[in-house]
Image (cartoon, rainbow, N blue to C red):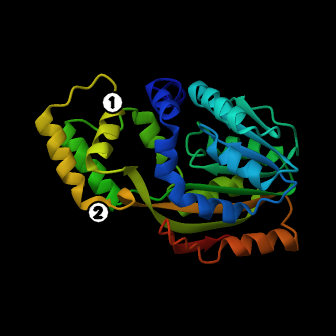
Amino acid sequence: MTVAEAWNGPLGQHWAAHPDRYDAMLDGFDTALFDAAAIAAGDRVLDIGCGSGLTTRMAARRAPAGRVTGVDISAPLVGRAGELTDTERFPQVDYRLDDAQTCAFEPGGYDLAISRGGVMFFADPVAAFTNIAGALRPGGRLAFICPQPAQPDGEERKALGLLASLLGRDHTAEKAVATAMASLSEPERIHEVLGAAGFTDIRVTGVSADTCWGKDAADAVGFFVSRAPGLTVSDATRAAMTEALLPHESPRGVMLRAGVWTVTAHTGRRASRAGRDCADRAQGPCADGAQGLIRQESRDSP
């Protein structure tokens, strides 16, 4: 199964059916992303891998006098994004069902490109980011988050691995997606790809946050199992999975710690002083008491 097939099949359908669950899982990283993006009221924003459109709508709230375009390869998710955006009434938002690697964007039509975990799936990352760079004006900005390398003893990796072993199968059936998730996990690779695509002022900052998997252990297990359609789980297995998550229950739900990279860069010529100031602000402490964001590491290009 290819990445596109996965996102247009059961995986994309599951995300489209449960946008609130997946957004809750990722919202601990939203502050870091939007601090890095530093969206201005009149900015023209491109949201890469927009999914069900939450980050697109968040960008629109920050750019009421601008416009925001969300692009994604998943038909179920783009359809869901359109429905949710129509409900909330954002006239400056539009969506495109397309691959950002090959999409015919208006040259220089955007001030900023953002992505919350949607840039790891390209067949040719350099070609994709080159195409994205072409959609940005000279000195335009790029801000995205992507997963850090999976740590064997990391809280999220350990818990999900245990659930998968109890379930008797890998929790990510779509192997192409799982492999692609790690394609930008090393800062050196991020610098290599973005540099080859013509970006400058590349900065990579580590951020960790709690990811919410459910309101309690039983709810989290139900959600986890639902990601494998057609799978029958015995009561004993479900009970063992629930017990494994009990230590992670909190008043906020079942929280598992995870880490991402926050990446910023500019196109073409080096950024203006104002642009560099925005990037510098993005490198400041990313602390959000409610979500537990912690700055870990920063790696800048020359």
Please, what secondary structure does the residue beneath circle 2 have?
Answer: loop
Q: Residue furthest left?
A: 236
The label on residue 292 is: none
Residue 203 vertical position relative to residue 133 in the rendered view, above or below: below
Residue 184 vertical position relative to residue 262 in the rendered view, above or below: above
Q: Nearer the viewer, mark 2 or mark 1?
A: 1
> At 29% across and 63% down in the image, what residue appears?
153
In this image, 60 relative to 263: left or right?
right
Instruction: Indicate which disc, 2 or 1, sits on the residue closer to the N terminus.
Output: 2
> At 53% across and 25% down in the image, what residue appears?
8
> At 59% across and 44% down in the image, what residue appears?
118
- The one of 33 and 89 positioned closer to us in this rendering: 89
Q: Position of residue 124 (x, y in %)?
A: 62, 39
Please, what secondary structure does the residue beneath circle 1 have?
Answer: loop
Badge 2: few (under 14), some or many (20 or more) residues near its Cα, within 10 Å? Answer: few
Q: Amino acid at mark 1?
A: Ala
Q: What residue does disc 1 label?
A: 228
In this image, 142 relative to 190: left or right?
right
Q: Is residue 202 visible?
A: yes
Q: Amino acid at mark 2?
A: Asp
- The one of 183 and 192 positioned closer to us in this rendering: 183
Badge 1: few (under 14), some or many (20 or more) residues near its Cα, within 10 Å? Answer: some
Q: Position of residue 159 (x, y in %)?
A: 27, 54
Cα–Cα gap, marks 2 and 1:
25 Å
Q: Position of residue 51 (x, y in %)?
A: 59, 38
Q: Quadrant of the C terminus?
A: bottom right
Q: What residue does disc 2 label?
A: 153
Q: Position of residue 38 (x, y in %)?
A: 75, 63
Q: Quadrant of the N terminus?
A: top left
